[in-house]
Amino acid sequence: MAKSKKRKGSYDPSQTLRPNRFDCSLENLTAEIHDLASKGSKPVWDEIKLNNGKQTPELRKKFISLAHSGMRQAQSKIIDIITSSDPWPRANILLLHKLADSMAWQMIGNQLCYARRFYKDQKIVDLKHSNFSSIIRAIEHYHEATPDGFALISDLTSFVQVGDLLLAGPEGRFNIAEVKEGDKNHQILDFLKFFMKSECPRALQFFIDEHGPHSLKQLQRMLRQTSRMAHVAEIFNSGVSQDPDTERKISIPEETVYIGSWDEELNNILNISDTRGYALETIDGCLFIASYSNTTTMAGGHFLFNTWFDNSGGTPDCPRARLIDCMSHPLALPIFNHNIADRHKLDILFGRKNVCIGLNIPAFFKQLIKNGVQVRQATNKEASEMDQKGFHPYRNGGKAYFIGVDNVETPLMDGIFLRIMHHGQRPIDTVKAILKSTVNFEPPE
């Protein structure tokens, strides 16, 4: 999907990566909802460990049932907050979206390739929209009919933008559903089902004559949504489908590609900063991370990090982020899904720790070349053509770059940085995995 070019704020070592936090009064309830969303299956964890991670059909069924039960309770608490007369402050509603996101990511196995299919670059909707009560009734009906299943409300999330409900069955498989209310919507939906089977142009004309142009627009919206839902379902079932919005063929490789993570290094610096106040680490010689805890070092930790990073060859154009920034990016893995202790998650969310991350691009290029990956500067014409198509390459010092192996190459874009910095993937492994899956050149989303 082509995306609009985003303006980057100017780099200021005294301001960039400054600590940020959510309202501390919301911590206990956030922790409670997170526990329900992620630990419903805890009663069978020891049994799974005794089986070395293997699950019998009966144990798997029990695991899924318990997990879904916890998610249902977590979602109910989120709904109660939204519909209450005393909702959370507007600036902290993002916490609710990310708590819902954490459940959606669990349902898709934390796989970014699937999350991209759900995301349509739309604004997060008002959670009190007019159809919300109908959607709540729909999930209650689904849960009553499917006691071991789970229906997640798409609008509670920040990235599921296809369908109204993401349905997970008792066997772990899921589907997408649309909730429609009103006689007119049902009439349009019935005609849509007929038209998609018959494709009769005369029937379409009769429909327009009877219901008017407004109903035609509603029909077109339903048709687009139906096409998107079918596309996502096809991707999950077969791994191959044509995106109805971009008309691009999307393929999810059947082969599982292992990409190393920097979870171990992250956990290490978080633990050290608990006692020392700070800790630093580098991954693959180019990814710099640091944790500053709630001591005298935290207030100025971001400045110390920027100084260390700059003195190590980082440039103002190099990607930098705080770990808490994952809470504001719709396709970033929420802090709740990161493989770190819950106490660290809460410390980061509520201002007791600030984790700074920077990817040193010059060092990144050197490491890529050292590992057999080619790096070349794009010509002005190539960079301009990508800009005109809406696929804006990352630029360092005003120059765009291609990375590749043999005859396969792809432009360096922000999507790679999303994987590295907000999905915890090791830089070199990430590039190798992307190039391995790139058969023909297409600018990545």
Image (cartoon, rainbow, N blue to C red):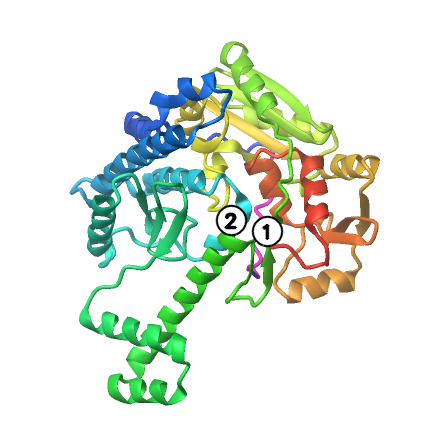
Q: CA distance from mark 2 to mark 1?
A: 8 Å
Q: Nearer the viewer, residue 214 or 243?
A: 243
Vertical comparison of 247 with 415: above or below = below
Task: Determine crowd level at label 1: few under 14, some 14-19, many 20+ residues with C-alpha closer than 10 A.
Answer: some
Residue ID for mark 2: 114
In the image as oriented, which residue stretches furthest toward the left? 85
| Amino acid type at mark 2 | Tyr
Residue span colored magenta = 2-13
Location of the N terminus by quadrant is bottom right
Q: Residue sitting at 71 percent across and 38 percent down?
A: 315
Given the image, on which type of amino acid does mark 1 rest?
A: Ile
Quadrant hosting residue 389: bottom right
In magenta segment, residue 11: yes
Q: Are marks 2 and 1 in contact (CB under 8 Å)?
A: yes
Residue 105 appears at what percent x and percent y?
Answer: 45, 40
* Disc 1 secondary structure class: loop
Q: Residue furthest front?
A: 57
- Residue at 29% of width from left, 79% of height from top? 214
95 relative position to 245: left or right? left
Query: Which of the two discs, 2 and 1, labels the residue nearer the N terminus?
Result: 2
Examine the image and state in which quarter residue 101 appears.
Answer: top left
